Amino acid sequence: MEFLEGPVLALIAVRMLFVVSSLFYLVQRYRVDLQMMQQNSYRNERYFRWWRTNSDYMSPSRLVDLAVLLLLFSQFHLLVKVGVATIVFAVKGIALSRKKYKKPLVMTRRVWRLLITMLVLTVFAVIPVAVAYYFLFDIGIVTVVAVLATFSWAVTAACNWAMKPVERAINKSFIDDAKRILAQMPDMKIIGITGSYGKTSTKHYLYRILSEQYDVLMTPGSFNTPMGVVRTVREMLKPYNQVFIVEMGAKQIGDIKEICDIVHPQMAVITAVGEQHLESFKTIENVQRTKFELVDALPDDGFAVVNNDFEYVANREVNNVKAVRYAVRATEHADYVAADIEYSAFGTRFTIKGEGRSVALETRLVGECNISNLMAAVIVAMRLGVSDDKIRYAVSKIEQVEHRLNMKRTAGGVTIIDDAFNSNPDGSRMALDVLSRMKGGKRIVVTPGMIELGDKQDYHNEHFGEHIAKSVDVAIIVGQYNREAILRGLQNAGMTDEEKVITVDTFAQAQQRLSSLLASGDTVLYENDLPDTFK
């Protein structure tokens, strides 16, 4: 007995190693799937669209899982099968645990609930195998883990669907609480801001200007979903707040109306209607309909500010409330226009003219898009009685919003234009226009192209390539997702020199190439930065 005690303990330790390493990998696999589910707003249809579009089911990681699963059902020796599976799972688990993401999983209460549900399902799958086939304890559990890992995307989606009634009940209680809080503040002015792009910058600019006269709260970061707005109300709104600025995002029809039904805005800003999120909206008409849900929700004495520079804003009539239209380019039918625009190394000078008023402004911001966003904010501030002097002062102090045409200069004399947040056809054109105006050194763009454009993805990225060729000296194309389309555009416009067109697989490689290219006086534009859901 004493002689057997050591080998028996060693065998138990090895068997536990098999099980623990397998389960560790499965938890890491679940974590990645949860991250993708979170980035797709916990909506199975979006999750499956990502799953299909990015061929996640055919990724090297999934194929390795499938190969291990087939090995476990093969005729190889038991020890060989379990040993190989354990080593593979241990290596993959450690790799996943160390991998860095641009947008890591945020362990919210909802994520914890979903993860616990997935783990409970796993336990119920593992325990019967461990009990019924104790003599095959190792291969039984490792096989169950291999099955769950191979089809973890299905486990994630199934558990997410099963938790819907629970999440719906929890969300309703939070929404009712937010409505109760807002009902207690009937004198507070609520301003909704939406648009295919420009809404976050406009929100920040309006907050800065109105803060000269009012106590203002705005939804932070990208809290532009119904539950993000609800969380802002429940956790941040104070009884003394006089103005609440609500950024409203949307990826499908009805998203804006859902937020409006919670906060009931009295004023609305629509910054743009463009071909953004066409994978979910399908048509630009659906984008228009959704963005104007904000204006349609206003009360009779409401006030709307809409951007006529976009065709699908200009051609949408507003009859339910007073509406003013502003423009930088399409000024013919606009109530407010930007005139006398002057760019310099220190920022921009321009004048807002409309309805008998003229306000000359200076800002550190650059680019047509920033002028447009400032116009919307200034018009709302005028409506709320902020004086011209206060508007001028606030605009002169406005800082650039991070990753949205943010300009800075390095110690080595290189100018960086950071437009890495959510590139789109109009925004990318404006960013390239700013880059093209830079003199004194090489003009370089670093970009992976644009995403979420549906059937027009290739079309817009090809035209993006053509604009690049007309605006820059060197183009660094990152990744493979849009590479072919952008290269076609570059070639169409005659930019084919290998020294001027550089392709790399990652942003890290792009930085390495830049280090050998840059000199004092050069300007680099970072246009878009793909999230983890895209390759």
Image (cartoon, rainbow, N blue to C red):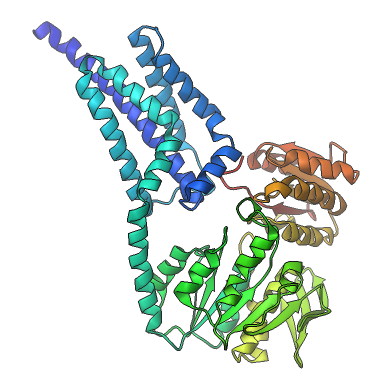
Q: Position of residue 349 (x, y in %)?
A: 78, 78
Residue 215, placed above or below residue 228: below
Residue 254 seen from this side: yes
* Figure quadrant of residue 534: top right
- Quadrant in which the C terminus is drawn: top right
Residue drawn at (66%, 57%), measured in percent from left and top? 276
Residue 489, placed above or below residue 21: below
Residue 393 seen from this side: no
Q: In the displayed structure, does residue 166 sit left or right of residue 49?
A: left
Residue drawn at (24%, 20%), measured in percent from left and top? 13
Q: Position of residue 204 (x, y in %)?
A: 58, 72
Q: In the displayed structure, does residue 15 sit left or right of residue 308?
A: left
Please name whichever residue, 431 or 299, is drawn nearer the observer in this view of the structure: 299
- Quadrant in which the N terminus is drawn: top left
Q: In the displayed structure, does residue 218 sit left or right of residue 54?
A: left
Q: Position of residue 32 (x, y in %)?
A: 45, 40
* Figure quadrant of residue 415: bottom right
Residue drawn at (69%, 50%), measured in percent from left and top? 450
Q: Which residue is at the far left?
A: 1
* Figure quadrant of residue 86: top left
Please name whichever residue, 76 or 505, is drawn nearer the observer in this view of the structure: 76
Q: Position of residue 508 (x, y in %)?
A: 63, 40
Question: How many numbered discs sit on the rendered protein?
Answer: 0
Residue drawn at (67%, 38%), measured in percent from left and top? 509
Residue 314, placed above or below residue 8: below
Please name whichever residue, 493 or 161, is drawn nearer the observer in this view of the structure: 161
